Image (cartoon, grey):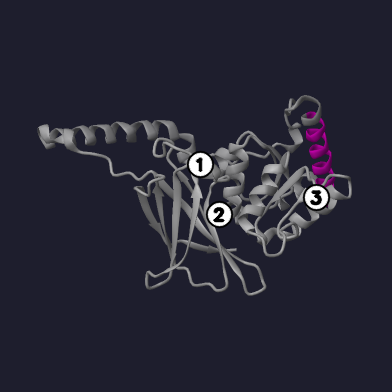
Amino acid sequence: MAHDVFISYSTKNMDYADAVCENLESNGVECWIAPRNIKTGTNYAKEIMDGLEAAKIVVLVFSKDAQESEYVNNEIDTAFSSGKHIVSLKADDSFPEKKMEFFLKNTQWLDASPTALKEQNKTLDDCYAQLVEDVKRVLSEIESTGRVVTTPAPDVVIAKKQKGFFDKYKLPIIAALLVLIAVAGFAFYSSMGSDSSTVESNETGISIGYIGLEDYGDGSYAYYVFGTIADDLSNSSDDVVHIDYLDDAGNVVDSSDSKIGEIEGNILGSIDVSKKDVSKVSVELQDKKGNVLDKIESDNIIEQ
């Protein structure tokens, strides 16, 4: 089914997400939402990435739970990197922080938090109606110009947090810390003498965001590994990301291989299994001759 909107949300906010979907679709805007649009027996992560890629707009149901969800963070990261237009419905009184604040700083907001509803004497239905209007306007702009040319109306811009001591004096504090770090670093390298030039970085070129576990509900499961490969680490689209999925004893349960040129979004690899027995993964970047260019292990399994 063709769709215009991808709905990103935490499963703890499913009521909001279902209401967003119902209101949009009842007004002629087709949506993609998990788990409804996940085909039985398919790869959960790939289906999400396909649904996200095909959408013109991402509607985020923002909340404290959404901000803490690795799934939501990865979806918004991918949407941001792909240049998707993001419209956010703020479902509680929390505020974006850290990387979520970076992704959403210049996006369109609709504040449906309990505090905002009380202060503005609005209902959730009012907010859903406004969301439908905003989404249809953005879709019209994308269709006619290929991009969104207007800015959000003043009444749908998220309220700013009251600045605390650190926020108020953040720049001077950071500047002072940088000076202290620079002085300490200079003293450290000076103490090493001429041998300091031989110190090399041990930073890895593979970064694992997290390993997701999806329960299909029919006795089968999927593990998928989200991460990144440094741009200067791989020289060929034929280089392979080889992943071993290991149990508690370190035995290989299954493996996956993905060519760099075929990796979609930030999914480095995935497997379908009949039982939950993976405790960690080992990820290798190999050239086409099988030589290992880099390797990393991770054990942060997150269950949907």
State the residue lying farthest toward the right: 27
Label 3 environment density (alpha carbons within 10 Å; few <14, some 14–19, many ≥20):
few
- Residue 154, position in %: x, y? 74, 32
Closer to viewer: mark 1 or mark 2: 2
Decide: is 222 above or below 72.
below
Residue receiving disc 1: 164
Decide: is 123 above or below 11.
above
> Magenta part of the protein: which range?
122-141
Q: Quadrant of residue 13?
A: bottom right
Gap in angstroms between the C-alphas marked 3 and 1: 47 Å
- Residue 22, position in %: x, y? 83, 54
Residue receiving disc 3: 1
Residue type of the residue flagged with mark 1: Gly
Give the camera-side residue of 11 and 279.
279
Give the camera-side residue of 223 and 138.
223
- Indicate which disc residue 70 carries: 2
Relative placement, left or right, of 144 versus 38 is right
Q: Is residue 88 visible?
A: no
- Residue 114, position in %: x, y? 72, 53
Relative placement, left or right, of 28 versus 173 is right
For the C terminus, the image quarter is bottom right
